Amino acid sequence: MESVRAVLVDIDGVLTVSWRPLPGAVEALREIREAGLAVLLVTNTTSRTRASIAGTLADAGFWVSAEDILTAPAATAAYLAEHCPGARCALLNSGDIAEDLDGVDVVDAADPGTAAYSAAVPDVVLVGGAGPEFGYAELDRAFGHLQRGARLVAMHRNLYWRTAERLRLDSGAFLAGLEQAARVEAEITGKPARAFFEAALARLGAGAGEALMVGDDIESDVRAAQRAGITGVLVRTGKFQPEDLRAADGTPDHVIDSFADLPALLRGSAQQ
């Protein structure tokens, strides 16, 4: 921990819940920055752009800009540019993220089997975050595209997320159904993909051994970061549930009550 130069931080469930700051989070982030550590907020949020997220966080008191944020949609745009250049993508997502999908050709694909389908046959079915758009007709249309050879690219595998009211079902549950029905495996571009964490480290100019990841999701945030060589810190806020920790295939490097406790963890390790 003495060698930590960079801190990767999940947003939803760690800094905020329903975009309201968790107690002590604003002050803790400020203290970490003032200590000279590089900070990047890394999120699978697919309902807002980086600029929108930055504006909301700034209004809540967090000292961040759009450049301090890496989203799954932004990582997806880079992935598609490298692995599927020029691909036509049928997007299934809740929220307007067009600004972060720079260069991605999103087509309004018709239902397979209709006369209009041949005019815009998608090469990729692109799955973002769940919402009202994930109805039977939309999922069945995506299934049809996959049956006809489209690649399945998903921004994440999150099964649920935390709101102020309760846990909400996310697109990972639907993604599993599409994979099984179409007999394909999704290419994941956000967390827990190793490439996502490598892109975050490259943004900060830090090596894996110099970074730690703070998250509320034991699998997508913490264990995935650890597999990439990054120190994993789990917080008991957001979607954290004790049973998930017990069922995990490994142990976080540190477990703390909330992000507000991170500065003390860093100070304590430095003293040791």
Image (tube, rainbow, N blue to C red):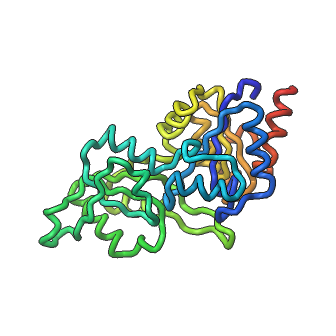
Residue 22 percent across, percent down from the top left: 75, 58
Can you see residue 195?
A: yes
Can you see residue 176?
A: no
> Which image quarter: residue 55?
bottom right
Q: How many marks?
A: 0
| 96 sits to left or right of 209 | left
Classify the position of the C terminus by image quarter: top right
* Residue at horizontal 13 percent and vertical 63 percent from the top: 118
* Residue at horizontal 31 percent and vertical 64 percent from the top: 142
| 11 sits to left or right of 123 | right
| 41 sits to left or right of 109 | right
Name the residue nearer the viewer: 118 or 173.
Answer: 118
Name the residue nearer the viewer: 112 or 110.
Answer: 110
Residue 14 percent across, percent down from the top left: 69, 53
Classify the position of the N terminus by image quarter: top right
Establish if 124 lies above or below 199: below
Residue 211 percent across, percent down from the top left: 65, 32
> Which image quarter: residue 265?
top right
Establish if 262 lies above or below 185: above
Residue 230 percent across, percent down from the top left: 62, 33
> Which image quarter: residue 250?
top right
* Residue at horizontal 33 percent and vertical 75 percent from the top: 137
| 257 sits to left or right of 171 | right
* Residue at horizontal 55 percent and vertical 47 percent from the top: 66
